[in-house]
């Protein structure tokens, strides 16, 4: 009998919000089951109920037909429920084998070298069974590629598969979101292997093509309710997106087009700048222009943005804003001069998690409300609501504490915060990572509008389709250097990937 993990009529309430409402789904061993839904639809909440992080407000969870009662993070493991969170914790200075053995039952008291050999054997065994025998347990974690690190985290989660404890369900919350395109397949192949061993795999991703490709069935959540569970063979990407979005007020925003005239004045320029990975980069962006940067992981894309913003000092070269030199290594000066920067890890880098959404959205612009506190407070809330509307942050509750918003909604809010400061130049690192299909269009539209009002935008994204959709032109970056540019109108995603990956050393 294949394993089953069932959630039966599960409900979770936060304050006056039903994050999940009587959701019923069965996860079958041997099957990859995707969970899809817009930001805030309840996906992570369902995962946290299974993990015993939240307690149920209604319904029950059953493993192989047995109701499991109140799960805790410890008891979830005993029932064979395993989790891989978006940024799995790895220990970079330990070996692969050490990382696999962390959290496993046997930390025997035997002498170090005996234990080591045992750990190496266990890791090797798990890798072999999962089709990745080339992963060497003795390697240091920090030497692995991002995909390999994810694979080690998966191995750690499912190592009990061949012991008495067993593994019934493996849950992966966006395991591939931060992986470079060409490494995604390594991880998805491994996920299939895990399912083939009889485990039920629950998989969350905003990448709908991948969902259809990898999963056998997909359950769509909308506003905390289950819309449908469908075999992926019977579903197109458009149908899946439509089912996530529903009807009503979420029809995609009308696309405005920004095409900056070639004779617009140059806003931001850099000549021969170097620093960190970046070598001798020169760039000119015009007023109203959206410029994309395509490069592989490690090509220096994010460093380039940090250099332009002054978050990292220049070793050589010069940057100017409308002809006036900027100060190297001074983000404060850059911000005052009119440059905005939304870093890649904005939830860690830019948010005040325990303050309200209104605080977070308006924080950088406090001085514009120079009036008594209570009046300011009201103005702040009103203006935060406008930004939440513009960037589709849900729920529209400015007084809700920031960290209680779903991952994607936090992302949207931080971009909104910067946009409302109306900088002359906005630098965006991975603007739509972790946001849903609808919000992605919404963010693109907001960026285009800002550009058509004269803002210059520089975008880094691992999603090359996004770069081609959004940008007026796309610059290619390889090994710290800018290597020419393409016109999105006559470039295909594969060509861009090829250009970014080609080796001309
Ligand atoms: N601890 C909490 N307290 C209050 N509200 C919460 C809490 N956790 C989640 N929520 C709310 O529940 C809803 C569902 O959130 P959840 O994190 O499950 O969404 P999600 O589908 O995972 O979205 P995303 O794609 O953005 O990650 C959201 O409106 C969120 O604000
Ligand atoms: Mg989530």
Image (cartoon, grey):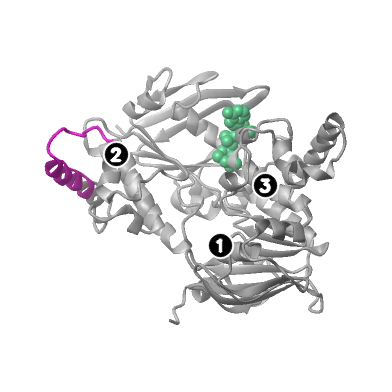
Instruction: Inspect the magenta stretch and tell me whether residue 397 lies in it.
Output: no
Query: For numbered disc 2, what is the local secondary structure?
Result: loop
Query: For numbered disc 3, what is the local secondary structure?
Result: helix
Q: Residue 185 falls in which quadrant of the image?
A: bottom left
Tag 3–tag 2 contact (CB < 8 Å): no
Numbered tag placed on residue 302 in the rendering: 1
Instruction: Inspect the magenta stretch and tell me whether residue 118 lies in it.
Output: yes
Numbered tag placed on residue 102 in the rendering: 2
Residue at 55 percent of width and 64 percent of height: 303
Question: Pointer 3: what residue?
Answer: 414
Disc 2 residue crowd, few under 14, some 14–19, many 20+, Cα 10 Å: some
Residue, far bottom: 504
When the figure is inspected, residue 185 is found, relative to residue 245, above or below; the finding is: below
Q: Is residue 37 visible?
A: no
Residue 114 horizontal/vertical position (percent): 12, 42
Q: Is residue 115 visible?
A: yes
Residue 483 horizontal/vertical position (percent): 56, 79
């Amino acid at each position: 009998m294949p394993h089953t993990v069932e959630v039966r009529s599960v409900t979770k309430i936060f304050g006056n919000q039903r994050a999940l409402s009587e959701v019923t789904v069965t996860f079958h061993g041997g099957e990859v089951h995707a969970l899809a839904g817009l930001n805030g639809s309840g996906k992570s909440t369902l995962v946290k109920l299974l993990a015993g992080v939240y307690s149920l407000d209604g319904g029950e969870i059953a493993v192989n037909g047995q109701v499991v009662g109140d799960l805790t993070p410890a008891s979830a493991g005993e029932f064979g429920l395993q989790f891989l969170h978006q940024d799995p914790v790895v220990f970079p200075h330990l070996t692969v084998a050490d990382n696999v053995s962390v959290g496993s039952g046997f930390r025997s008291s035997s002498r170090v070298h005996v234990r080591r050999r045992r750990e190496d054997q266990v890791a090797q065994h798990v890798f072999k069974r999962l089709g990745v025998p080339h992963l060497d347990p003795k390697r240091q974690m920090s030497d692995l590629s991002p995909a390999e690190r994810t694979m080690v985290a998966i191995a750690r989660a499912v190592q009990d598969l061949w012991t008495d404890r067993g593994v019934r369900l493996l849950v992966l919350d966006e395991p591939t979101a931060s992986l470079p395109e060409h490494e995604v397949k390594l991880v998805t192949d491994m996920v299939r292997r895990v399912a083939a061993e009889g485990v039920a795999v629950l998989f969350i991703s905003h990448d709908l093509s991948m969902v259809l490709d990898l999963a056998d069935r997909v359950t769509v959540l909308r506003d905390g309710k289950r819309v449908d569970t469908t075999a992926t063979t019977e579903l197109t990407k458009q149908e899946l997106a439509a089912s996530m979005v529903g009807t009503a007020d979420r029809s995609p925003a009308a696309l405005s087009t920004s095409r900056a005239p070639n004779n617009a004045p140059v806003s931001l320029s850099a000549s021969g700048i170097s620093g960190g990975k970046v070598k001798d980069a020169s760039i000119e962006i015009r007023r109203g222009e959206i410029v994309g940067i395509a490069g592989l992981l490690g090509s220096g894309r994010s460093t380039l943005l940090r250099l332009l913003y002054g978050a990292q000092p220049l070793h050589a070269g010069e940057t100017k804003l409308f002809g006036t030199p900027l100060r190297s290594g001074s983000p404060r000066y850059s911000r005052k001069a009119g440059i905005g920067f939304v870093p890649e890890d904005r939830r860690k880098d830019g948010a005040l998690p325990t303050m309200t959404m209104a605080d977070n959205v308006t924080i950088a612009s406090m001085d514009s409300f120079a009036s008594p506190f209570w009046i300011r407070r009201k103005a702040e809330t009103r203006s935060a609501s406008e930004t939440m509307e513009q960037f589709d942050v849900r729920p529209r509750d400015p007084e809700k504490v920031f960290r209680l918003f779903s991952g994607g909604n936090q992302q949207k809010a931080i971009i909104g915060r910067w946009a409302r400061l109306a900088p002359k130049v906005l630098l965006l690192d991975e603007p739509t990572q972790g946001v849903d299909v609808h919000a992605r269009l919404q963010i693109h539209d907001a960026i285009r509008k800002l550009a058509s009002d004269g803002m210059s935008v520089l975008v880094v994204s691992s999603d090359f389709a996004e770069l081609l959709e959004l940008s007026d032109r796309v610059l290619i970056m390889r090994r710290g250097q800018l290597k020419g540019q393409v016109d999105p109108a006559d470039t295909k995603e594969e060509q861009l990937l090829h250009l970014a990956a080609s080796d001309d050393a």
